[in-house]
Image (cartoon, grey):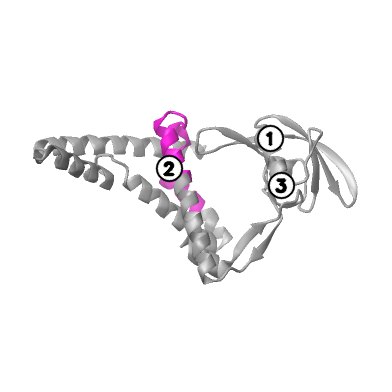
Amino acid sequence: LFSGLTFFNGRAVPLDTTIIGVIAENEPADKAGLLSGDKIISIDDVDVSTWDELRIEINQKPRQNIKLEYERNNQLFDTSILVSSMLIPNGDSIGVIGIGSEFFKSDPGFFKSIYYGFNDLLAWLSIMSQSIYSFFTGQLDIKNFGGPILIGKIAGDAANIGMGAIISLMAILSVNLGIINILPFPGLDGGHALIAIIEGIIGRRIPFKTLMIIQQIGVLLLAIFFFIVMKNDISRLF
């Protein structure tokens, strides 16, 4: 899916400048009056000349007020912005103001699309794996997880954007479900594989009654988790 999207839709390649390409509606940059095409000159009197420098300065200041100097129509302006925070897979928060860089669209060929698709798959595998690891190590709170209602909302937003966004969401959800399914947890495929490995090590079958108890506990825990994420979804609506 990732490769197909790249092949048919092309690939957005970001430009390493400090010129704003896109602004998210109702985010800090939008509320501060920044516009697409504005060039950011400095943040808290620290000059920035590349998008990476700009991103690093903002990311390290979640929930802080920053002074941002920018250029518009050959005139310099400055404004104060309260940086929002965004949770990343390892459980940390980074600062964001809702802007994206300028980019150009490239049209990679068939083999290059496969290469980009494979890289996208690895990137999402890494993100999902970090999220699950952070959850089990206590770095990521269960309140940050969403269920069917949140997925439905995201799917609705994707539908408003277009078919490409819907296919991208399908690809990401496929990676997510694939990783969850291989977790060594009773009731999942990974749990069945773990039981088979244990039986191979001990050289005998685990009693059926014991397996049923393990499966029932696993299903109960999965049901509790599902109830919690549904509660999270409902709380986000109000």
Please say whether residue 215 is visible from this viewpoint. Answer: yes
Residue 134 lies in the magenta-colored region: yes
Q: Position of residue 190 (x, y in %)?
A: 28, 45
Element under label 2? helix
Please say whether residue 231 is visible from this viewpoint. Answer: no
Mark nearer the N terminus (3 vs 2):
3
Q: Where is residue 176 in the image (x, y as percent from the top left)?
A: 41, 49
Query: Which label is found at residue 51?
Result: 3
Q: Which amino acid does label 1 sit on?
A: Val
In the picture, measured across the screen, residue 142 lies left or right of residue 238, that is left
Element under label 3? helix
Q: Where is residue 147 in the image (x, y as percent from the top left)?
A: 42, 43
| Label 2 sits on residue | 129
Q: What residue type is labelled 3?
A: Trp
Q: In which quarter of the image is residue 66?
A: top right
| Label 1 sits on residue | 83
Q: What stretch is highlighted in magenta?
A: 127-155
Q: Which of 191 and 169 is in front in this view?
A: 191
